[in-house]
Image: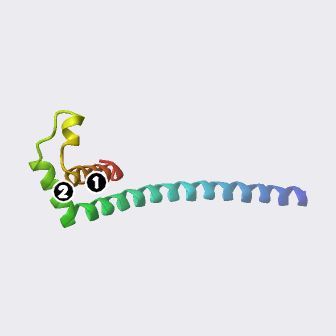
Amino acid sequence: MNSELVSLIANIALTLSVIVAVIFGIAQVKASSKDRKERLTVETLKHFQTREFAETLHFMHTLDFPADYGAWQQRSDSDQVRFIQLSQEMESLGL
């Protein structure tokens, strides 16, 4: 009977440790998800609050978009680079 009691206590301890580990894991996943969202928000704000980004947005609002790729190639290199840069920033931010 003594060994049965020890075995029962060991099984209960193992079960409790698994339950605690699962609860802790769920809490860690939720915290990680929240942290990831907060970092994305901060990173987005950092990109939006620069003079260069404001200049690029202004450029986009005043730009007459070409109708096709041939007309696009006739734009100046700096115009093409600014548009590509803004596109890449928006894509990296998930926007």
In terms of secondary structure, where does tag 2 sit? helix
Amino acid type indicated by mark 1: Gln
Instruction: Please provide percent x and percent y for residue 88.
Output: 32, 51
Q: What element carries label 1?
A: helix
| Image vertical order of residue 65 relative to residue 56, above or below | above
- Location of residue 71 in the rendering, given as x and y in whole percent from the top left corner: 18, 37
> Which residue is drawn at the image coordinates 21% and 40% (left, top)?
72
Q: Is residue 57 above or below residue 49?
A: above
Q: How far across and how far down the image is residue 49, in percent?
A: 21, 65
Q: How far apart are marks 1 and 2 (CA)?
A: 9 Å
Relative depth, front residue between 23 and 36: 36
Reading the image, the residue beneath label 1 is: 85
Circle 1/circle 2 CB separation < 8 Å? yes
Residue 78 percent location from the top left of the image: 21, 55
Residue 43's tag is none
Task: Sort mark 1 into few (<14), some (14-19) or many (20+) by Cα contacts within 10 Å.
Answer: some
Q: Name the residue under label 2.
A: 56
* Residue at (87% x, 55% y) in the render: 4
| Quarter of the image where the N terminus is located | bottom right
The residue shown at (61%, 58%) is 20
What is the crowding at mark 2: few (fewer than 14 residues within 10 Å), some, or many (at least 20)?
some
Q: In which quarter of the image is residue 68?
A: top left
Q: Residue furthest left?
A: 62
Nearer to us in this view, 13 or 32: 32
Indicate which disc, 1 or 2, sits on the residue closer to the N terminus. 2
Q: Is residue 70 left or right of residue 22?
A: left
Q: Could you tell me which residue is drawn at 21 percent across and 66 percent down?
A: 50
